[in-house]
Amino acid sequence: MRAFKIVFCWATPTPIPITYKGDDLLIDCKYFIVYANSQRNVIEDLKGTDSKIISNINKIIEWN
């Protein structure tokens, strides 16, 4: 597993409600660190999150 940083658009209001691996979370900042095998898995793990929030993702980068 590798760490990835999901960065949301600066205009996205907080808290950001997301569903990650089936858990409903409220993120109170513009980024979120997750663990997955690839960037594709990160998007798949966000299944259930509102599509508007998904479209507000600015980038997903590997995080050290």
Image (cartoon, rainbow, N blue to C red):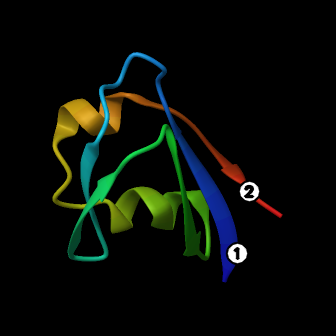
Residue 28: x and y in percent read: 38, 46
Q: Secondary structure at mark 1?
A: strand
Quadrant of the rendering where the C terminus is positioned:
bottom right
Total marks in image: 2
- The residue carrying mark 2 is 62
Q: Residues within 10 Å of mark 2 (few under 14, many from 20)?
A: some
Residue 25: x and y in percent read: 26, 63
Q: Would residue 13 appear left or right of 48 to someone viewing this image?
A: right
Farthest bottom residue? 1
Residue found 27% across the figure and 36% down from its top: 53
Q: Nearer the viewer, residue 23 or 55?
A: 23
Farthest right residue? 64
Badge 1 vs badge 2, beta-carbon distance below 8 Å = yes
Q: Would residue 56 appear left or right of 51 to someone viewing this image?
A: right
Residue found 70% across the figure and 75% down from its top: 2
Q: Nearer the viewer, residue 35 or 10?
A: 10
* Type of the residue with mark 2: Glu
Residue found 51% across the figure and 59% down from its top: 40
Q: Residues within 10 Å of mark 1 (few under 14, many from 20)?
A: few
Farthest top residue? 11
Which numbered circle lies on residue 2? 1
Which numbered circle lies on residue 26? none
Sequence-earlier tag: 1 or 2: 1
Residue found 41% across the figure and 56% down from its top: 43
